[in-house]
Image: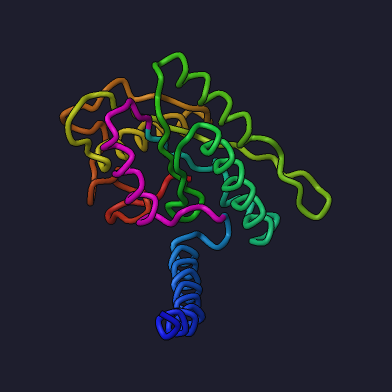
Amino acid sequence: MSQTLTALAAALPLAAGWSLDALRLHRRIEGARRDPLTGLWTRDAFEERARKSLTQGQQRAVYVLDLNGFKEINDTIGHAAGDAVIRATGQRLGRWTEGHAGVAGRLGGDEFAAITPACGIHHLCSALRDLLDRLEQPVEFDGQPIDVSASIGAARYWRTGTADLSALLRAADEQMYQAKQTGGGWGIAPKLEPAPAFRTVNGRRDGRPGTSGGTAAA
């Protein structure tokens, strides 16, 4: 018995070291899947979690948003100011999404996405108004406020079976684009149509980042 106890005592530090190394490795892997500027999930990590969320059998809303006039901020105030706006936008979206038991990610540039449970159209409208209000608060940079404007699109999923995340993102993206064309705000896709309203490339509206044959919306 004493030999067994001695062997266990000798093994404990080694096991603890393995556990600590595994924890550090896990943290490094998780950190690599986070956007360094905003702390949100990167595109691949977000889509992985969004697809898992869609399998849980509850109503969900998928959101796509980006900033209006972001290029002008970079061009007139500087890229450091643009980074400050992106950082603040990501943090605001992250807090809002956490408050709605959802997941958020940065898709790239000034484009973001999120998924949350959805409890009916009226609740979704209220949530979108709240999100837009948070996003459009001025961002302080070098002691000066920078005005922020955003466009948001949302698409709901409430049926049973396998959901197509790409189709939901595309529908939300189209609503975001339509809102942007009228100066900003938000819109909700009424349902997933058999054919998209805009031509798509690689599952996304033509002209969005990651497609070819067009230019991104301003």
Q: Nearer the viewer, residue 101 or 18?
A: 18
Which corner quadrant of the image does residue 43 belong to? Answer: bottom left
Measured as percent of width and height from the top left, residue 52 is found at 30, 44
- Quadrant for the N terminus in the image: bottom left
Query: Residue sitting at 57 percent across and 44 percent down?
Result: 69
Picture residue at 51% right of the left edge, 50% below the top = 110
Count of picture labels: 0
- Does residue 42 show up magenta in the picture? yes
Q: Which residues are magenta?
A: 39-61
Question: In this rendering, would 88 be left or right of 30?
Answer: right
Residue 215 placed where, x, y %?
37, 51
213 to the left or right of 124: left
Residue at point 45%, 63% (across, down): 30
Q: Is residue 88 magenta?
A: no
Q: Is residue 56 above or below residue 38?
A: above
Expressed as whole percent of the image width and height from the top left, the position of residue 5 reads 45, 79
Q: Quadrant of residue 2?
A: bottom left
Query: Looking at the picture, does residue 69 appear above or below residue 192?
Result: below
Percent of width and height locating residue 79: 64, 61
Q: Does residue 34 lie above or below 168 as drawn?
A: below
Q: Residue 16 vs residue 193: left or right? A: right
Q: Viewer-proximal residue, 98 or 104?
A: 98
Residue at figure coordinates x 22%, y 24% from the top left = 159
